């Protein structure tokens, strides 16, 4: 009987090694936001939160981080980005609802700033092949300027097949 079991056990061990490898890749990949489409977003979010920079899709941060963003608009990365109460309510409802499925940990905020998308572990990992000098190119300006490389970022399209780094 043991003669039969050995090859079987070996097969199982190999199959499970492959499965582990797949699982590892999948788990690795899951640690990034998934729901990035901004279809159905209220117009006021696009106009108010997209006037100084692109309107960052809600799925890029967990709800707790958006709450921190919205609670600190008076001191928003060195600018005052306060809104009137009615617009604020619409935007808050939208961002919290649309980010509810993003359960990634909230990035820590630094130096009195609210959390940044560009400081999340997944962002840093996904962009580890972008050289520091590239971020500083005049055509890019900063990592926060997603649309420099992801043309349809505002619609939530970050597909790596469509990434184009400008010169
Ligand atoms: C008056 C201009 C202004 C308005 C209006 C504004 N922001 Fe910003 N926002 C900034 C600046 C400046 C930065 C820092 C950009 C940089 O570091 O390159 C920033 C950064 C951010 C970041 C962090 C990006 C990163 O680096 O990860 C988020 C998220 C963000 N804003 C969300 C919002 C939301 C949500 C609204 C609407 C409620 C909003 N912003 C409205 C000026 C503005
Ligand atoms: C200087 C160019 C550049 C900027 C600016 C940039 N990215 Fe990227 N991004 C890339 C490159 C290059 C990749 C592809 C890495 C790869 O091929 O695996 C990527 C990959 C991604 C991915 C993974 C896509 C996938 O299919 O796995 C996401 C999500 C993403 N970026 C989000 C963002 C967000 C959000 C911003 C702005 C806050 C941003 N990026 C700014 C260059 C950039």
Image (cartoon, rainbow, N blue to C red):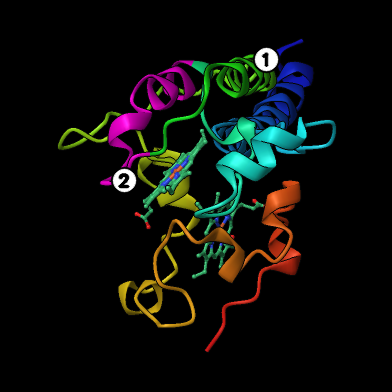
Mark 1 lies on a secondary structure that is: helix
Return the disc, 2 or 1, that comes first in the chain's sequence. 2
Q: Main secondary structure of the magenta part?
A: helix
Is 22 magenta? The answer is no
Label 2 neighbour load within 10 Å: few <14, some 14-19, many 20+: few
Q: Is mark 1 within 8 Å of ligand 1?
A: no
Position of residue 87 measured from the top left corner of the image (x, y, whole percent): 61, 24
What residue does disc 1 label? Answer: 97
Residue 117, compared with residue 90, is above or below; it is below
Please identify the quarter of the rendering in which residue 137 is found.
bottom left
Q: Is residue 114 visible?
A: no
Q: Is mark 2 within 8 Å of ligand 1?
A: yes
Position of residue 63 measured from the top left corner of the image (x, y, whole percent): 52, 17
Q: Residue at x 56, y 41 (%)?
A: 49
Q: Residue at x 44, y 23 (%)?
A: 70
Please identify the quarter of the rendering in which residue 16 is found.
top right
* Front-most of residues 49 and 107: 49
What residue does disc 2 label? Answer: 79
Label 1 neighbour load within 10 Å: few <14, some 14-19, many 20+: few
Position of residue 43 measured from the top left corner of the image (x, y, whole percent): 76, 36
Residue 92, compared with residue 75, is above or below; it is above
Position of residue 17 measured from the top left corner of the image (x, y, whole percent): 62, 33
Which region shows up in magenta?
Answer: 64-80
Q: Residue at x 61, y 64 (%)?
A: 147
Image quarter (top left, top right, bottom left or bottom right) of the N terminus: top right
| Residue furthest out toward the left | 111
Tell me, yes or no, whether the two marked residues, 2 and 1, touch with CB atoms within 8 Å.
Answer: no
């Amino acid at each position: 009987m043991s003669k039969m079991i050995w090859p079987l056990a070996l097969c199982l061990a190999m199959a499970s090694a492959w499965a582990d490898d797949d699982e590892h890749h999948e788990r690795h990949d899951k640690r990034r936001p998934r729901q990035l489409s901004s279809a159905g977003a209220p117009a006021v979010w696009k106009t108010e939160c997209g006037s100084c920079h692109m309107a960052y899709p809600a799925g890029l941060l967990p709800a707790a981080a958006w709450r921190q963003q919205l609670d600190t608009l008076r001191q928003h990365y060195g600018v005052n980005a306060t809104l009137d109460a009615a617009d604020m309510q619409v935007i808050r409802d939208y961002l919290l609802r649309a980010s509810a499925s993003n359960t990634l940990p909230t990035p820590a905020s630094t130096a009195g700033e609210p959390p940044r998308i560009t400081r999340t572990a997944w962002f840093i990992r996904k962009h580890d092949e972008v050289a520091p000098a590239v971020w500083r190119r005049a055509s890019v300006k900063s990592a926060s300027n997603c649309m420099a490389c992801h043309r349809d970022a505002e619609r939530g399209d970050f597909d790596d097949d469509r990434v184009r780094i400008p010169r």
